[in-house]
């Protein structure tokens, strides 16, 4: 039997349907108001998110909800975890364990160098779209989640909410998913294990059941300078870096050929194999100087069945080989390999029951798998079955004039209201 039963569309949900609205007045005003409010907070990852978090905290406190904050080391950023408890109002018992998490990140990417038609931190409606940084990635989902909380609180107080509903807002997702692990560690310490999680990244309200992991590495090649007319006295950092870059490219082609035929499930991914890609490179000071330093970065986006060791083992062997060649000429030379980002893949191995619930709510049986990474992998690693489903298109994320269709907010409102009904 499903942990969530009784999925239905009652009279309350009649005004939250998935049809295309005929006018602006039919769009969900509360979600639009909340999204306008959230966009007004400049939560670019390099800035603090505390103003947004405190605003949401005050709202949740007014609803009488249970709130828990976790902070970064500098205390200038915070995660917020809110629980709407379940229980029987006849005995006053409140249940906070189990239940469903609605998860979103509060930070957004920078607008530097982008040509915006309107102020990116002032929500602007033009036609059927709402523009602003974070409109789709992913303050739109957060706005809809905050809109559903008052009704969830009412159901909780009346004893009708049979399973708790949680809202998790994290910091620094855009720079390596740094906040979510603190939420998960705090939940573990408090003995709370949610049954399911829905991450509201933009999917056009389609169900994403798995995504790739991502690891970002920086490679520093330390050579030895010399005049370019005396190359034998130096060790060319750029030349050795280029050999390693070529090795990474060859390994990427091998992954393409190998992963594409391993599993039929890979075909659901938009890119059905693990990838390696060199992204930046810099080195050298002048043409007539043998360079003593070259740095480059590359990222690895792995299918769920792959691990970081699958590419690290051969790359580290190549690094050792090239370092030995360099040090034979100058002992002080060599190659460093540093990991800067590591976000796990999200698997669909334990989320069958959750997927069935989403199908019942959306009447859409399609499953999707994507190459981009989210906090979903961290939730599944913590033993919480997770899917991704949220308003807006990922194609609009991170761009100038980022927007979300107002009809997508309406669809998300309808989805969350039905989801709440399934918890009763």
Image: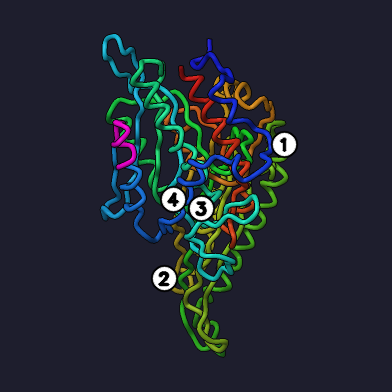
Task: Tell me the mark number nearer the camera, choosing from 4 and 2.
Answer: 4
Query: Label 3: which residue?
Result: 134
Residue 34 locus on image (x, y percent) = 45, 45
- Against 148, residue 51 (above or below) is below
Query: Counting other residues with Cα less than 10 Å from the Cα at mark 3, is it few (<14), some (14-19), or many (20 or more)?
Result: many
**Chain-order first, disc 4 or disc 2:** 4
Q: Which mark is residue 331?
A: 2
226 in magenta: no
**139 displayed left or right of 371:** left
Q: Which mark is residue 38?
A: 4
Q: Which residue is mark 1?
A: 267
Q: Earlier in the sequence, mark 3 or mark 4?
A: 4
Decide: marks 1, 2 in contact (CB < 8 A)? no
Give the spatial CA distance, label 1 vs label 4: 37 Å
Helix, strand or loop for disc 1: helix
Disc number lying in front (2 or 3): 3
The span shown in magenta is 58-67
- Front disc: 1 or 4: 4
Q: Nearer the viewer, mark 3 or mark 1?
A: 3
| Disc 2, SS | loop
């Amino acid at each position: 039997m499903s942990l969530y039963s009784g999925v239905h569309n009652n009279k309350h949900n009649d005004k939250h349907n998935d049809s295309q609205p005929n006018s602006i007045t039919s769009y969900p005003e509360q979600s639009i108001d909340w999204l306008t409010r959230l966009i007004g907070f400049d939560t670019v990852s390099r800035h603090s998110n505390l103003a947004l978090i405190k605003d949401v905290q005050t709202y949740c406190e007014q609803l009488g909800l249970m709130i828990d904050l976790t902070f970064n080391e500098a205390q200038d950023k915070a995660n917020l975890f809110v629980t709407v408890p379940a229980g029987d109002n006849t005995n006053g018992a409140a249940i906070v364990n189990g239940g469903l998490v609605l998860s979103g990140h509060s930070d957004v990417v920078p607008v530097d160098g982008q040509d915006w038609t309107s102020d990116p931190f002032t929500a602007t409606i033009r036609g059927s779209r709402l523009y602003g940084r974070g409109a789709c990635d992913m303050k739109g989902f957060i706005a809809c989640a905050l809109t559903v909380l008052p009704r969830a609180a009412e159901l909780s107080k009346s004893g009708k909410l049979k399973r708790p509903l949680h809202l998790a807002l994290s910091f620094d997702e855009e720079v390596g998913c740094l906040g979510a692990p603190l939420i998960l560690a705090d939940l573990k310490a408090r003995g709370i294990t949610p049954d399911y999680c829905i991450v509201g990244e933009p999917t056009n309200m389609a169900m994403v059941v798995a995504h790739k992991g991502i690891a970002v590495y920086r490679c520093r090649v330390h050579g030895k300078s010399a005049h370019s007319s005396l190359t034998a006295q130096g060790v060319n950092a750029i030349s050795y870096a280029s050999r390693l870059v070529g090795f990474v490219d060859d390994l990427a082609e091998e992954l393409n050929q190998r992963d594409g035929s391993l599993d039929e499930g890979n075909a659901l991914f938009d890119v059905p194999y693990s990838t390696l890609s060199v992204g930046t490179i810099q080195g050298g000071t002048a043409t007539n100087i043998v360079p003593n330093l070259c740095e480059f970065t590359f990222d690895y986006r792995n299918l769920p069945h792959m691990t970081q060791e699958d590419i690290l083992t051969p790359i580290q062997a190549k690094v050792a080989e090239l370092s030995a060649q360099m040090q034979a000429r100058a002992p002080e030379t060599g190659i460093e390999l540093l990991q800067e980002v590591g976000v796990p893949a999200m698997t669909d191995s334990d989320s069958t029951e959750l997927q069935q619930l989403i199908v019942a709510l959306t009447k859409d049986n399609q499953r999707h798998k994507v190459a981009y990474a989210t906090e979903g992998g961290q939730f599944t690693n913590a033993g919480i079955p997770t899917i991704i489903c949220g308003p807006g298109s990922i194609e609009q994320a991170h761009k100038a004039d980022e927007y979300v269709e107002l009809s997508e907010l309406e669809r998300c409102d309808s989805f969350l209201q039905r989801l709440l009904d399934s918890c009763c």
